[in-house]
Image: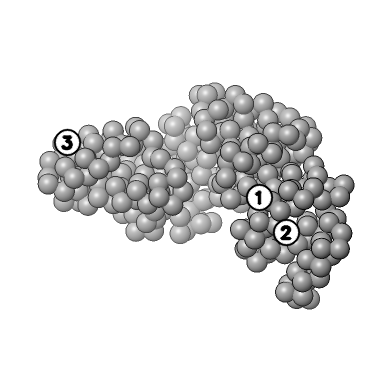
Amino acid sequence: MKQYAKAKEYLRRAIEVSSQGESYQVLKNILLLENDLDGALELFSAAEKSNADSAGPRLTLSLGLLLAKARHRNDALQRLMMETKNGAALLAAGCIMQERNDVNAALARYKLASHLMPESAALWNNVGMCFLKKQKFVAAVCCLKRANYLAPFDHKILYNLGLIHLVMQQLASAFHFLSAWVNQSPYRGQAYMLLAVVMWNLGSVEAAKVLFEQAARIDQKDPLVALNLAIFVHNTTKDTDLISSQLRDFQERMQNLQQTTGEFVDDELVRAAHFLADRHPREDNRIVEEEMII
């Protein structure tokens, strides 16, 4: 009936009478349906402190997964590391470790998870990207293709397959997977950006230019999109005005990313931006160069 307000009222009453874990779980699900992640976190934090009857481990696990969803990584990992027999917890803990570039620790978690959820496309996608980080390309492709078999329309998997084939200079395969991603998700700038790189490597400069510009129009947040367009222009038309414009965009996007998510742009990207600023000296480029130091 989707009468969420009444349902929440009765569930809160039930929790006041008897702190049963099932009441917390159902209330959490309703809050998540309403996109109230903060409310769900507040609920389970209170539940953890009150030590709800016969539900401690389950509530701790749920809180860990919620914290991971909210990107409170340290608190999430502290709780998720307690669980070694739940596939979702192992996968979430591995994701956090992978984001921290602790690939070996992530793979150890994923290995445990593979026995519990062998048909998880997300798991095999993440394992594949760990192998890519270790430059074990054959293993990475095998894992990603298994993920693609399990979830053929998952855009992240298509993106990663396109990326790894591009890294391996298998341009036809890269084009195949990235084109599939664009057809499914025509409003994602990263897809156009990687397709542009493929076309550039194939020698089609005009097609690459159109795709780079399309990526920059669609994606107003990713610093890499702006930087790649600047690099492309530097290597082709040498249009200093356009390069300067993209470097300013890169700077703004980098700062917004740091302020909104706390994430930092990779040092190699910052060095590439400095290189372009040095090669195309302008007053606004010097400002970018000075302010891009992390």
Eyeballing the image, is 233 above or below 103? below
Cα–Cα span, label 3 and label 1 = 45 Å
Q: CA distance from mark 2 to mark 3?
A: 53 Å
Residue drawn 76% across and 32% down? 84
Residue 62 in the image: state x and y as whole percent.
Answer: 73, 48
Give the quarter of the figure containing the N terminus: bottom right
Residue 278 x %, y % = 16, 36
The residue indicated by pointer 2 is 28
Query: Horizontally, is 87 left or right of 132 in the view?
Result: right
Which-is-in-front pick, marks 2 and 3? 2
Numbered circle sitting on residue 225: none
Query: Is residue 178 or residue 257 the one in the foreground?
Result: 257
* Quadrant housing residue 290: top left
Residue 283 in the image: x percent, y percent?
12, 46
Residue under the point 48% across and 34% down? 165
Q: Earlier in the sequence, mark 2 or mark 3?
A: 2
Q: Earlier in the sequence, mark 3 or mark 1?
A: 1
Q: Disc 3 marks which residue?
A: 278
Residue at image point 16% right, 36% down: 279
> In the rendered structure, which amino acid carries the disc numbered 1?
Leu
- Which residue, given by chain and number where applicable, does mark 1 sit on? 66
Cβ atoms at labels 1 and 2 below 8 Å apart: yes
The x and y percentages for residue 72 are 57, 45
Q: Earlier in the sequence, mark 1 or mark 2?
A: 2
- What's the amino acid at mark 3? Asp
- Can I make out residue 166 in this image? yes
Q: Give the colour scheme of this rendering.
A: one colour
Which SS class for mark 1? helix
